[in-house]
Image (cartoon, rainbow, N blue to C red):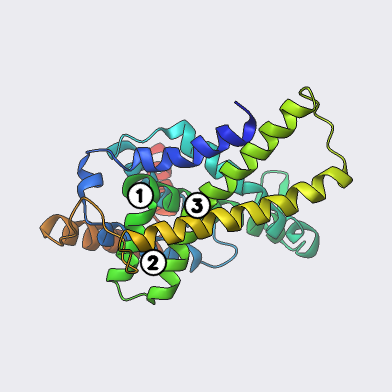
Amino acid sequence: MNKIDSHLIDIGYMDTLASGDSVLHRLDPRAKLITTLVFIVTVVSFDKYTLSALIPFLIYPMFLVTAGALPFTYLIKKVFLVAPFAMLIGVFNPLMDREILLQIGALHISGGWISFLSIMLRSVLTVSAALTLIALTGFNSVCMAMEKLRIPKPFVIQLMFLYRYLFVLIDEAARMVRARSLRSFNSNTMTVGLFVPLVGQLLFRALDRAQRIHLCMCCRGFDGHFHTIRPMKIGFNEIGFVVGWSSLFVLLRYQNLSVKFGEIITGFIQ
């Protein structure tokens, strides 16, 4: 199995995780989506020099991973895949902002380094929350929750098709790479003159197969709606989940519990 096949299985593994039967899996997707959105908005609303106040927010993704029995190692690897993009955003901060804001003994830390670390921590928090949401709910259920929340239907449908046809594109690419490998006796040489035609053929084959899939969906009565096995129903568990976590996020937004906890420990030591 080549690398493209393994990546295809890796993407589909998120849907496998969403088929679990924990309490969090059974919650209405709208409750999990709203709570995650509140979490992300709260995290990104902090000042660029905020660092310690963001640490308590780790409790939310850690709770979802633990209570949902999700594989921690698998999710953390996905978070690290996004880390380079966040690093590119803040990599020049230490060079542009050299004002000393923190001193630890003989170590002087500039505002640029603090803002850089803040960007990286926000990236870990937001990406881990989004990944756990998909792993607990499934991408299609998340899109259906968006539709129920009155998000424009064309946007939701395009998002669904983007996710579904991603598998079509990867599958076609895997077939082409496998065919080339068999015809070239497993040669790994890939020149520009060979790569460009492969990309062009991949585009035409993916479009042709996507059209055939769309015609099959229309023949089977597709009317722009996607259906899931689990019904959507808001109950006391969903209301408690949203209200409880949202209240905690608001509390963490205006109260730096890390500093308060440090003051308590320092008082006991003294």
Instruction: Label 1: state its secondary structure.
Output: loop
Left or right of 261 in this view: 114: right
**Residue receiving disc 2:** 254
Q: 117 or 128: which is nearer to us?
A: 128
Judged by depth in the image, the label closer to the viewer, 1 or 2, is 1
**Residue tagged 3:** 127
Q: Quadrant of residue 149?
A: bottom left
Residue labelled with disc 1: 138
The residue type indicated by label 2 comes to Tyr
Query: Within 10 angstroms of label 2, few (less than 14), some, or many (20 or more) residues?
Result: few
Q: Specify which label sits upstream in the sequence, 3 or 2.
A: 3
x and y percentages locating residue 40 in the rendered image: 44, 62
Q: CA distance from mark 3 to mark 1?
A: 15 Å
Q: Quadrant of residue 219?
A: bottom left
Q: Name the residue located 75 percent from the left edge and 47 percent from the top edge.
A: 198
**Residue at the outermost top position:** 185
Q: Nearer the viewer, residue 134 or 200?
A: 200
Q: Is residue 228 left or right of residue 175?
A: left
At label 3, the amino acid type is Val
Residue 62 location (% of width, % of height): 38, 42
Task: Report the residue at 71% width, 55% height from top.
Answer: 88
Tell me if I can see residue 198 in this picture.
yes
Query: Mark 3 falls on what kind of element?
Result: helix
Q: Residue at x 49, y 42 (%)?
A: 11
What percent of the width, then of the height, locates residue 10?
50, 36
Tell me if I can see residue 249 in this picture: no
Select label 3 or label 2 by which is in front.
3
| Classed neighbour count for the residue bearing mark 1: other residues with Cα under 10 Å, few (<14), some (14–19), many (≥20) | many
- Residue 67 position (above or below residue 196): above
In the rendered image, residue 228, in percent from the top left (x then y), is placed at 25, 54
